[in-house]
Image: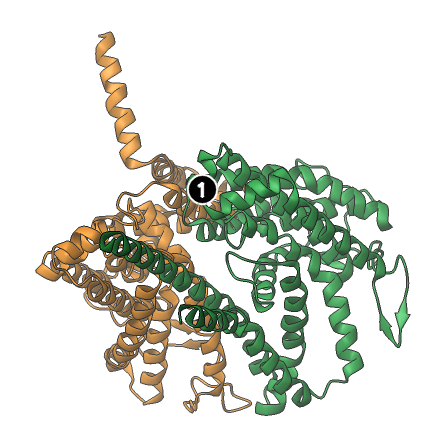
Chain colours: A green, B orange
Amino acid sequence: MNNNTAKKGNFGNFLRRSSVPLMFILICAVCIPLSGLSPSYLVNEIVTRMGRNAFLILALLIPIMAGMGLNFGMTLGAMAGQIGLILASDWQIIGIPGMVLAMILSVPISILLGMFCGKILNMARGREMITSYIMSFFINGIYQLVVLYLMGSVIPIKHSTIKLPRGYGIRNTVSLLSMRQKLDNLIPLTIKGVKIPVATFIVIAVLCVFIVWFRRTKLGQDMRAVGQDMEVARDAGINVEKTRIIAIVLSTVLAGIGMIIYLQNMGNIATYSSHSQIGMFCIAALLVGGASVDKASIGNVFLGVILFHLMFIVAPRAGAAITGDSMIGEYFRVFVSYAVITVALIMYETAKRSEKKQGGEQLKQAQLEEESK
Amino acid sequence: MNTDTKKEKGAFGKFVESFGLPRLLITAFLLLLLILAPIVGADLPTQITNIIARFSWNGVLVLAMVPMVHSGCGLNFGLPLGIISGLLGATMSIEFGFTGALSFVMAILIATPFALVLGALYGWLLNKIKGGEMMIATYVGFSSVSLMCMMWLVLPYKSPNMVWGMAGKGLRTTISLEGYYIDVLAKFLRIKIGNFEIPTGTLLFFALLAFLIWAFLHTKTGTAMTAVGSNPTFARAAGINVDKIRLLSVVMSTWLAAIGILVYEQGFGFIQLYMAPFYMALPAVSAILIGGASVNKASITNVIIGTILFQGIVTMTPTVMNNMVHMDMSEVIRIIASQGMILYALTRKTEGSK
């Protein structure tokens, strides 16, 4: 009897956990025929976007493991990556070496920002997500200060092609023509008209292996313990604060590198806006893949990229086909991205509350049994 | 002598602690700007007029934070939801052909039921997810704004003053209020001396709402609200229906936001649709925090001081900076100061939270 209800609960849980991906499969199934886009075009786009975004989304996994929720502060890493790229392109280091240099430059900035973010998040325990979200705005202000005022006046920038005409500050778009898709095309491979960025996928695979390996290390185990229960972890002799900071630093560094991979595929930097949306899209994609605020796997990342970007490609066309107005589809996909995050957050919070209640009831039952004995 | 200075230092230290270092810095910065303004050649009366005008536009939006903070729902990052109710009221009032001052009254009347229904739904949701209000409020705001982006295109608005000229349908991104309720409050009893101007009507309107909230917080229900905010367990033990009180506070906040955006529009002169309400919560949140509120404590005084300080910096920095160094860093300063303030407030330990 008891077993039966437990099974039912499991099935319900499964449905609840996978409701978002199922909903997306439905949306895509309706929209794909309406959009009239050919399958080969779609496959091509999805493969490109997988290479572009997967690394960034993988950067979100470690803080979730450490129980810090969705790291809206990944924008910090993205900004560090952009600073690295701006400097590398000013020094005219082209191709793969330029990218590597940008990564090397971004890492110390990411570490510093990550440490700062981690310290603040330790002070705002219990509301990490909103704090990391506001943090991304705050650091954006400092980023603008650096890029718009200090670059060219304090930090030397040689080439006028990336400088604003007034003599300091960086232009709205920085062209990365010399690095454009250099990583994607490093090992060229085309199967049935689908271009596959092999080298990018190799980098992503290496990161996946790293994450799997990292989970098994002492530090990874500590992080999971901290994510489970901070007090228990502290009693077990884990330095909770330090572990949490390391989680955020790792995520920020990975986000920085991910941003460089993302931008080499795009081919240019929108200096003042590239980073601002990246956090939202990555988080939405991860959640669409079936992750929740406290649990996410590598599988979620890839499923999320496919479903979310499929929706992203077909929605405007489908919207135009239904209503005759392309803007509707445009707004629709923005709405869906936000709605997915909202629903996921609500589900997480309600689950947390019902778990607490269940725990209380179990305790009550145990006490009753004790008394009846 | 020696002990005296020590004592003074202690008192000063205590003052800094209670006032908060960031707040002190922001006040000092504004004072510095006010002193610098005449030196660098900016016209001080114009500046002060601007600050007062902007205060009158934004006051009610900041006031909309108070009820939710009082009941322990945290900072109302879901402000856009109320703003949308206000926008619905504004556009429908124009659509139905009301003009002049009447269009303002009708906008409020039409916005009210929307605000009540949306606020009730929003409050019901926030009761389900106690503890995670702020993050979810943010995203409820975002989702509703992006949903309304579609609605503005689809809803059957016809008024030629509001829809796109070519297509004949779909609302424009900005709608001029000329002929409708532009300056309708500000014109009332306006005082004008040279360059100096006071929009008395708007200030009175704000004062009326602020007084109503203040009076409400001193009624039985209002005290219950404060009790729920400061210690929910105790409040429940005292026989207060916590969920009901929280719901009421959210409805009040949402309604105030709806009124707030209408007051803002009458001063600004335009209705802004589509993505405009998106980030409107953040300035209001940082304003009330700069005024001395914390995540679970806020008063009318915090609203007034905070709005003056925040709007003061927003208006003064560009002029002073431009006159001084010919470099407009105001946007960056505004971002760093306001977001920094929110961060500071979030990291403070709050008693009785959860």
At 56% from the left and 82% from the top, the residue drawn is A328
Q: Secondary structure at mark 1?
A: helix
Q: Position of residue A308 (x, y in %)?
A: 63, 71
At 27% from the left and 43% from the top, the residue drawn is B351
Which residue has dot 1 on it? A230
Q: Position of residue A183 (x, y in %)?
A: 83, 56
* Residue B31 seen from this side: yes
At 81% from the left and 42% from the top, the residue drawn is A91
For the image, the number of numbered tags is 1
Name the chain under label 1: A
Image-quadrant location for residue A21: bottom right
Query: Quick check: A6 left or right of B184?
Result: right
Query: Quick check: B279 left or right of A151?
Result: left
Query: Quick check: A290 left or right of B217?
Result: right
Q: Residue furthest top?
A: B1
Q: Position of residue B78 (x, y in %)?
A: 37, 64
Q: Nearer the viewer, residue B320 or A170?
A: A170
Q: Is residue B338 above or below residue B210?
A: above
* Residue A147 seen from this side: no
Q: Nearer the viewer, residue A360 or B186?
A: A360
Quadrant of the image containing the N terminus of chain A: bottom left
At 76% from the left and 44% from the top, the residue drawn is A102
Q: Position of residue B205 (x, y in %)?
A: 20, 65
Image-quadrant location for residue A154: top right
- Type of amino acid at the residue the image marks with label 1: Met
